[in-house]
Amino acid sequence: MTIRPRLLLLTGWLCGLLLAGCGTTSPSPTATPTPTGPDFTQPGAASAMVTQLLEDAGSQRALTVEITKTTVEVTVLNSDELPVAWAYRDGTTGRVTTDQQYVDQATFDVSRFNISDVGGLFRAAEGQSGSASNQSLTIVDYSGGEVMMSVSTVPESRTVFFNASGSILQTLNFDTSGGVEAGIKDALGPRLTVYSITVDSTQGVTVDYPGATGTTVRRTRTAKVPVTTNVAVPAVDLPVFLATKVEPARIVEVVDRVRASEDIADDVGWSVVIDDRRNLGVPRMYFSIGTKVLVTDVEGNEVIG
């Protein structure tokens, strides 16, 4: 009878050890912090924030829009036609300082531009430029009132341009009738009469036409870059002609014919200047194809002078 209490005590002590061991648990893993704030590469996120910022700024038209994965900034003109900027940064929205200057750049309706999926635009740009480092989407008057959407990176790689629809700006081959046609169309814009049209198979298409009094406007479309506009002084001393008289297919037909007859390699560059330098009332086409120089009418028929 004297053993039972000691057995009970020993048994209780062992059970205590076992229970203590069973109750031991490993420390819970530390939860990985999740990023705070919206991801503007997600569908709908950027467009919603741009709309909110424009409402905050009290404007329906923007001077610039810039979007990254974590920030959005819009610049508008105030009642004094001075640029003011509103942005989302670090979890807050509000007016921010800007060093942007207004020099008659075009303002635009942001709803014209498809920014519903900025992540998709970033991926498309990466496919073209080979870089996704610190991508930034910008909508701005690129040159001469041409508002363009583009994606750039830091460090800088090739800037990729997009049409308002969200499609990538077409890369043009000026050694084909399709490339020449698209280049002339882009360079002309809404213009009907011009001083001259120049096509260079390795450089692009340039159109010259009258600007303000005493000036000439030059618009150039290169293979991978949208139209750029420059104004020169003085005006060109040439009569204007209807640009619709020029058929891109005829240009390439002349080039192909000369290459075949003169045994000129297909990769040899060529150029043509189309103007009415002889005041004939119709333009002529002045070709340089390799070492061959010739003049044709707009139908591609060779003429003298």
Image: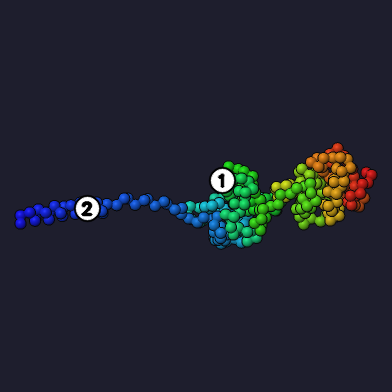
In the depicted structure, whether residue 88 falls above or below residue 278: below
| Residue name at image x 29 percent, y 52 percent | 25
| Residue name at image x 54 percent, y 55 percent | 40
**Residue with the mark numbered 1:** 133
**Residue with the mark numbered 2:** 18
Amino acid bearing label 2: Leu
How far apart in space, not on screen, are marks 1 and 2 (Cα)? 57 Å
| Residue 293 picture location, percent across and down | 88, 40
| Residue name at image x 86 percent, y 40 percent | 263
Query: Is residue 78 visible in this depiction of the protein?
Result: no
| Of labels 1 and 2, the one closer to you | 2
| Residue 262 picture location, percent across and down | 88, 40
Residue, far right = 304
> Which of the image's four quarters has the C terminus?
top right
Q: Is mark 2 on a helix, strand or loop?
A: helix
**Mark closer to the chain start, 1 or 2:** 2
Frontmost residue, 298 versus 281: 298
Relative side of 8 to 61, left or right: left
Q: How crowded is mark 2: few (under 14 residues within 10 Å), some or many (20 or more)?
A: few
Frontmost residue, 84 versus 28: 28
Frontmost residue, 55 versus 128: 128
